[in-house]
Image: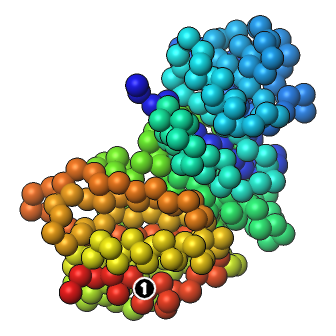
Amino acid sequence: MSQVPVTVLTGYLGAGKTTLLNRILTERHGKRYAVIINEFGAEGIDGDLVVNADEEIFETNNGCLCCTVRGDLIRILGSLMKRKDRFDAILVETTGLAAPAPVAQTFFVDAEVRARTRLDSITTVVDAKYIQQRLDDTSEAAEQIAFADMILLNKTDLVSAEELAAVERRIRGINPYAILHRTSRCDVPLDRVLGQGAFDLERILAQEPEFLAVDDHDHHHDHHGDHDHGHPAPLRHYHDEQIGSLSLRSERPLDRERLQRWLQELLATSGKDILRSKGIVSFRGDDRRFVFHAVHMTMDGDFMAPWPDGAPRVTRLVFIGRDLDEAAIRRGFEACVAA
């Protein structure tokens, strides 16, 4: 049974999430989307879009479905999956004041949900005009950016080119790895936001092998020591207030048991502060690439296709979190390199 891709949509109050949802529920895009939102009424989704309302799942006149998350998310997903009519993707909107982690973790922890769906991306809508203020006065805005696989930098028509560049620098300081679309009124084609596989590290690395290798020439990166070939070293460490990101690499293979034990221990003790982690790993004695993702303490990993013939087998790990203990993480990582 094919898995339905799920996009978790987040963004601070007023960023433009409802604009995006209204587009999905009104445009003639020829796709069937199921949209799970927090509540009706105040969300501005027009009543005349709703064609037939059974209990919690409403069908719109372009064939999309609309559900409310007053009920438990797993239960709603279960009732969606029982429907005879198939849909192309599911979009789950989180409240504007919340970090998206608990919603994202649902797609790891429930066996039935995992079998029927796959997390396609955590997508964050950012208000280009007001995000700098939000980052100064709230922690949630920075967390939403830190969790993102994809960012819609919205309302770009309301700021100057200089302001936009400053906002992008600040976003990249928190999360250098998310795919970023500049938009006004969330006017990006829906097929560039939904079903992109942005959470799927294997797919991204197949398209962009250097995805986790941050560009040395980028002007806003701090350099924390060069790395000599064959030795693991963090490439970059960014900072925006307390949230920063740390990138590690090794050209020597890692010991599988040691790495798994270290990651489990690290996430168990520091997972509340490590918002997102991901990596692609070369293990000693194994030709396959190991790819993992974690949201806080919830980790998911699997072996993927073998390393391409002749390609360097470079392990890369990325951590995005609050007050990361760079030296301790580096030591733990170095201890996993196979003897």
Q: Quadrant of the C terminus?
A: bottom left
| Residue 74 sits above or below residue 53 on the image | below
In the image, 109 versus 316, the foreground residue is: 109
107 sits left or right of 58 in the view: left
The picture quadrant where one finds residue 311 is bottom left
Which residue appears at 78% of the width and 29% of the height?
68
Q: Position of residue 218 (x, y in %)?
A: 44, 72
Q: Position of residue 157 (x, y in %)?
A: 70, 45
Q: Position of residue 29 (x, y in %)?
A: 56, 18
Q: What residue sits right under mark 1 in the picture?
A: 332
In the image, 158 versus 263, the foreground residue is: 263
Which residue appears at 51% of the width and 77% of the height?
265
Which residue appears at 34% of the width and 63% of the height?
280
The kind of secondary structure element at disc 1 is helix
40 sits left or right of 91 in the view: right
| Residue 39 sits above or below residue 304 on the image | above
In the image, 178 versus 80, the foreground residue is: 80
